[in-house]
């Protein structure tokens, strides 16, 4: 028997030797995943449950810290508007922008603000958990309600430094500068032509922000468990399971900083799934009864076979490491799809590529599992993982197809099938010669990108659409004439084949921006001149704290707890409370 290291841990029905029916009823009431349970009341199973209840896990003593997105923002200037800008009223935002402009040496800033070609805007973005200096992020742009700008179409966001902000009285106070942003505005193409008047005065710059800082993540010991000895013991348990390479040497990921805070490095395999990393860390055993490891493996083997408890069991097996692999491989033989998926997901993070085929099956057939399945496939960087992802590129689901493409590109971008090219300075461009219904996918987050699934995307005769304020595309028969008209500049005309790929390439030659190209695709679709399905942002989203700006999901809606404050001297964060 192990002497408990603390008391008053969070209640977990699955870790107590309750009669099965009572435990199961409570699990159903609490949505099923509070802890492991199995469908038996035998003395053998009750003994195993007692051992599990006596085992102390990292999550019994700690809560995660640093998992909230950090909002940064500032007043900024948009230029290049076609007479739709306006002179902002005298207020704190205007004063903040004027101060910025004066600091940059702008001559006659008030005259510039009064121009109809410019607009004051408010810019904000979120630095995700674990962000590293130099990483890119999306930024949202919106005209404040007291400004009379009528449209941001065609605008360019001038370089802006973003910081944490707070309004005190009538003055805006800012903290450390944490990001910088600049680029062409993408005004929401989906809402074009609707009755939403605000759609024209807000937009985004996909991937336009660059982080100027790195953010730590870690664990905070609950007040009743704080001690230097326990902090070190927990850190040792985590580092015994997870290592990373720091400054050329292999080291444990956990660094106890104080009696209440343990800083965590992020292993490469979890870089894009921090939510799972934190859950696995929380399932690491700090102390087990004598002989408890073997008994726990036996219990978790039984629980993995039950769809009700498979997910939690797989997570705890993953936390045990390599010794759990044989049990998880047995889980791949189950007749239940959810059990196979739970086992395959854990195996992927244990560097077992045998999971790839089962993850691809889950991505195609278990919609709720799709984001997690694709995230797990991303870490299987071998022939099995690549083949599994390529098999999804012909799916009838836009979400599955683009999710598979994006995962493939991020995993191994030189693969000829997904390598693509850069269309001028506008965006990434990929034409995939794959089976399945034709599809055009465009992004409004992460970075500007257009992906064509299939090679035939013809445009109908008689089409006439605009691509920005200066470019017109007209289809006559099998020819698309792309013309750029600008005052004081000779007209430029390019003839192309009447299909989406050829026209997009012609637009790049005419120096169209990404928003110009999106406008072309959206107007062609609205006129039914482009029969190929056009979709935006079809990437499956896992709930790991890295949602896109376009979703604008609040922290509370995500169910992410507010980060408890930690002394900046120990955490490596700025002195501003990131949960504000």
Image (cartoon, grey):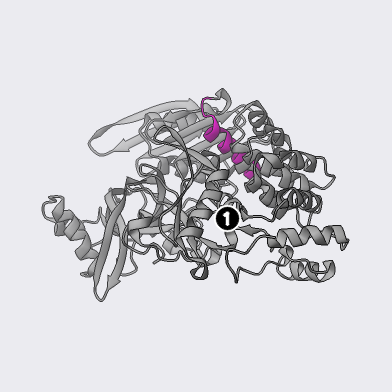
Name the residue: 49% across, 45% down.
253
Q: Is residue 412 magenta?
A: yes
Q: Magenta segment range?
A: 397-414
Q: Residue furthest right?
A: 42
Label 1 sits on a secondary structure element that is loop
For the C terminus, the image quarter is bottom left
Name the residue: 45% across, 36% down.
473
The quadrant where residue 135 appears: top left
Residue 416 pos. (x, y %) = 55, 23
Q: Residue furthest top?
A: 416
Residue 342 shown left or right of residue 242 in the figure: right
Q: Nearer the viewer, residue 227 or 244?
A: 227
Q: Nearer the viewer, residue 479 or 208?
A: 208
Residue 285 pos. (x, y %) = 62, 53
Tell me, yes or no, if residue 153 can be seen here: yes
Residue 207 pos. (x, y %) = 41, 45
Q: Is residue 320 above or below residue 59?
A: above
Name the residue: 70% across, 60% down.
1
- The residue under label 1 is 543
> How dense is the environment of label 1, judged by Cα within 10 Å: few (below 14), some, or many (20 and up)?
some
Name the residue: 53% across, 62% down.
62
């Amino acid at each position: 028997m192990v002497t408990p290291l603390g008391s008053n841990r969070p209640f977990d029905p699955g870790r107590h030797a309750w009669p099965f029916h009572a435990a199961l009823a409570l699990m159903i009431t609490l949505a099923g995943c509070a802890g492991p349970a199995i469908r038996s009341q035998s003395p053998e199973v009750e003994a195993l449950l007692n051992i599990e209840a006596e085992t102390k896990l990292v999550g019994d003593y700690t809560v995660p810290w640093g998992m909230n997105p950090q909002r940064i923002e500032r007043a900024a200037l948009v230029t290049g508007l076609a007479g739709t800008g306006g002179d902002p009223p005298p207020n704190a935002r205007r004063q903040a922008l004027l101060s910025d402009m004066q600091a940059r040496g702008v001559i006659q800033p008030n005259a510039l603000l009064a121009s109809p070609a410019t607009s004051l805007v408010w810019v904000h973005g979120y630095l995700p958990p674990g962000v590293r200096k130099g990483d890119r992020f999306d930024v949202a742009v919106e005209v404040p309600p007291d400004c009379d700008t009528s449209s941001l179409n065609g605008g360019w966001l001038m370089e802006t430094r973003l910081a944490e902000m707070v309004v005190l009285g009538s003055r805006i106070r800012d903290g450390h500068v944490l990001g910088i942003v600049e680029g062409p505005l993408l005004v929401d193409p989906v809402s074009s032509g609707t009755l939403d008047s605000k759609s024209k005065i807000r937009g985004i710059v996909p991937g336009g922000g660059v982080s100027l800082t790195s953010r730590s993540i870690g664990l905070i010991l609950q007040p009743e468990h704080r001690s230097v000895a326990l902090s070190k013991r927990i850190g040792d348990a985590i580092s015994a399971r997870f290592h990373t390479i720091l400054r050329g040497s292999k080291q444990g990921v956990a660094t106890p900083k104080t009696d209440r805070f343990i800083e965590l490095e992020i292993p490469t395999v979890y870089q894009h799934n921090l939510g799972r990393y934190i859950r696995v860390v929380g399932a690491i055993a700090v102390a087990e009864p004598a002989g408890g490891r073997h008994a726990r493996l036996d219990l978790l083997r039984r629980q993995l076979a039950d769809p009700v408890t498979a997910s939690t069991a797989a997570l705890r097996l993953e936390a045990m490491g390599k010794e759990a692999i044989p049990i998880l491989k047995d889980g791949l033989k189950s007749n239940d799809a959810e059990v196979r998926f739970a086992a395959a997901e854990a195996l992927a993070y244990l560097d077992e590529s045998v999971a790839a085929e089962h993850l691809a099956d889950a991505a195609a057939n278990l919609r709720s599992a799709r984001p997690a399945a694709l995230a797990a496939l991303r870490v299987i960087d071998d022939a099995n993982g690549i083949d599994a992802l390529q098999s999804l590129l012909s799916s009838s689901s836009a979400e599955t197809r683009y999710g598979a493409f994006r995962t493939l590109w991020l995993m191994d971008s030189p693969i000829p099938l997904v390598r693509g090219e850069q269309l001028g300075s506008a965006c990434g461009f990929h034409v995939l010669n794959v089976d399945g219904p034709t599809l055009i996918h465009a992004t409004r987050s992460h970075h500007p990108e257009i992906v064509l699934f299939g090679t035939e995307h013809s445009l109908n005769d008689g089409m006439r659409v605009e691509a920005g304020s200066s470019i017109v595309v007209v289809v006559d028969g099998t020819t698309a004439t792309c013309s750029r008209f600008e005052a004081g500049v000779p007209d430029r005309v390019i003839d192309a084949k009447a299909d989406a790929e050829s026209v997009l390439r012609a637009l790049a030659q005419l120096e169209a921006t990404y928003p110009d190209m999106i406008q072309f695709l959206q107007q062609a679709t609205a006129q039914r001149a482009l029969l190929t399905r056009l979709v935006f942002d079809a990437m499956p989203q896992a709930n790991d704290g890295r949602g896109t700006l376009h979703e604008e999901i609040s922290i509370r809606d995500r169910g992410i707890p507010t980060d408890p404050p930690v002394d900046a001297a120990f955490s490596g964060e700025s002195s501003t409370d990131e949960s504000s």
